[in-house]
């Protein structure tokens, strides 16, 4: 089932069942309290109920304030550690801007990062941990499936960031403290005005299968969390044959949205079938001859997930970074930097630079997360075939 959202705020208080109680110090049942439901970040609960995972809960600490950030990290020790290693899925430029903003607030802590699409990123970190290498402090993912899987495997450190107080429980892991949601992204359709005749301009999702766009349409590769969400949502909406029709368009697949919009702006492609709003606004501001279409059916949307990694080499710096990312100070970077442009779930974050809030868009999220997670291998196989891989 796909559930649309016309107004996020109207549904923020709706929750699924409360989390299961702990079965023991290292054996806790994972359920999902409605995550991504009706445009707020909530899904039908429970998700992956009764799946045990290792608990690594941080001891309670006093909360201190640095700048305007509430933190339970030992700031002096974090500065002594002097580094935070970040794994993320955003573009190189987006991650660089994010980390630069953190360093500006905490100049004694240097940063380094690895950037890959979520699927490849998760494969990398799990392979490293299986080999006994624990070099990551903070992980950010764009797909709930690996976030939950990482929780099952004991990959997240359970750190109760004081900044979670500004977020509804729906926007946190269950049990709380493993990961939170620093923003929401969504995608429509974009086209090059010079390459697409006005009468051929797409208006609905079905229009991406217009034969006029054959050999001139692009999307992301199967490693993208957003691509999985779009595939799943439109497959549920239009049936299993929808993407097989899309395959006849001979689409080209790319790793990053920058590649998609570069090609679109240059006219190398006529249509982008997975046009992230953040990417569109960036290129439109540069004067690119492109248009953005928000289909009336709604737009696939994803949350991003961030948390402290268990066995982090710089644990205090990692906690401080997550506190910063979830704070209003960090959220203004996630939301206001146009290379990122993630809609914030904090009520005090204000609108995006475009003047829009998440509630202004009709967003589509999966509501059966068991089905969504289970669909991932099917998606990867089908999408690779569509992309000729």
Image (cartoon, rainbow, N blue to C red):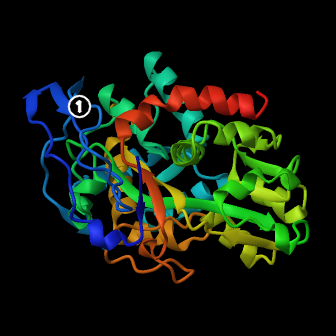
Residue drawn at the location 49% of the way across and 29% of the way down = 125
In percent of width and height, residue 196 lies at 87, 66
> 103 left or right of 240?
left
Left-right relation of 377 to 172 = right
Residue farthest bottom in this picture = 355
Label 1's element?
Answer: loop
Mark 1 burial class by Cα count in 10 Å: few <14, some 14-19, many 20+: some
Residue 244 in which image quadrant? top right
Identify the residue position indicated by label 1 in the image.
49
Coordinates of residue 85 in the picture (x, y in percent) = 48, 43
Q: Quadrant of the C terminus?
A: top right
Please, is residue 242 above or below residue 131 in the view? below
Q: Is residue 97 left or right of residue 177?
A: right
Q: Is residue 269 above or below residue 278?
A: above
Total tally of numbered discs in the picture: 1
300 vs 117, nearest the viewer: 300
> Which residue is drawn at the image coordinates 39% and 38% (left, top)?
147
The answer to whether residue 66 shows anywhere in this view is no
Is residue 134 in view? Answer: yes
Percent across and percent down for residue 222 are 63, 36
In the current view of this chain or complex, which residue is farthest to the top?
A: 131
Q: Residue at x 22, y 37 (%)?
A: 31
Asked if residue 140 lies left or right of residue 258, the reply is left
> Residue 53 at x, y = what percent?
25, 26
């Amino acid at each position: 089932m796909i559930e649309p959202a016309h107004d996020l705020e109207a549904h923020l208080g709706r929750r699924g069942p409360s989390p299961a109680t702990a079965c023991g110090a290292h054996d806790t049942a994972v359920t999902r309290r409605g995550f991504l439901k009706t445009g707020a970040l909530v899904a039908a609960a429970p998700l992956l109920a009764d799946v045990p995972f290792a608990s690594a809960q941080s001891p309670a600490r006093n909360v201190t304030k640095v700048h305007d950030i509430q933190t339970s990290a030992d700031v002096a020790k974090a500065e002594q550690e002097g580094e935070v290693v970040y794994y993320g899925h955003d573009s190189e430029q987006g991650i660089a801007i994010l980390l630069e903003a953190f360093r500006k607030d905490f100049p004694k802590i240097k940063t380094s990062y690895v950037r890959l699409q979520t699927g490849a990123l998760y494969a990398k970190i799990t392979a490293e941990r299986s080999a006994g290498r624990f070099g990551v402090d903070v992980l950010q993912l764009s797909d709930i499936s690996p976030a939950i899987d990482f929780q099952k495997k004991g990959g997240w450190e359970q750190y109760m960031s004081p900044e979670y107080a500004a977020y509804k429980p729906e926007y946190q892991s269950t049990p709380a403290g493993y990961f939170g949601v620093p923003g929401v992204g969504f995608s429509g359709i974009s086209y090059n005005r010079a390459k697409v005749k006005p009468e051929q301009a797409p208006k609905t999702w079905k229009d991406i299968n217009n034969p006029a766009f054959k050999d001139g349409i692009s999307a992301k590769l199967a490693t993208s969390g957003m691509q999985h969400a779009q595939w799943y949502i439109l497959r549920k909406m239009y049936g299993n044959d929808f993407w097989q029709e899309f395959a006849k368009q001979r689409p080209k697949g790319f790793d990053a949205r920058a590649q998609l919009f570069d090609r679109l702006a240059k006219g190398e492609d006529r249509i982008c079938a997975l046009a992230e709003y953040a990417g569109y606004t960036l290129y439109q501001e540069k004067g690119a001859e492109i248009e953005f279409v928000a289909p009336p059916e709604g737009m696939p949307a994803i949350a991003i997930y961030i948390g402290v990694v268990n066995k982090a080499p710089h644990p205090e710096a990692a906690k401080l970074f997550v506190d910063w990312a979830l704070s209003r100070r960090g959220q203004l970077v996630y939301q206001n930097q146009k290379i990122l442009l993630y809609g914030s779930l904090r009520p005090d974050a204000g609108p995006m630079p475009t003047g829009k809030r998440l509630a202004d868009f009709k967003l589509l999220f999966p509501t059966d997360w068991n089905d969504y997670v289970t669909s991932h291998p099917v998606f990867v196989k089908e999408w690779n075939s569509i992309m000729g891989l």
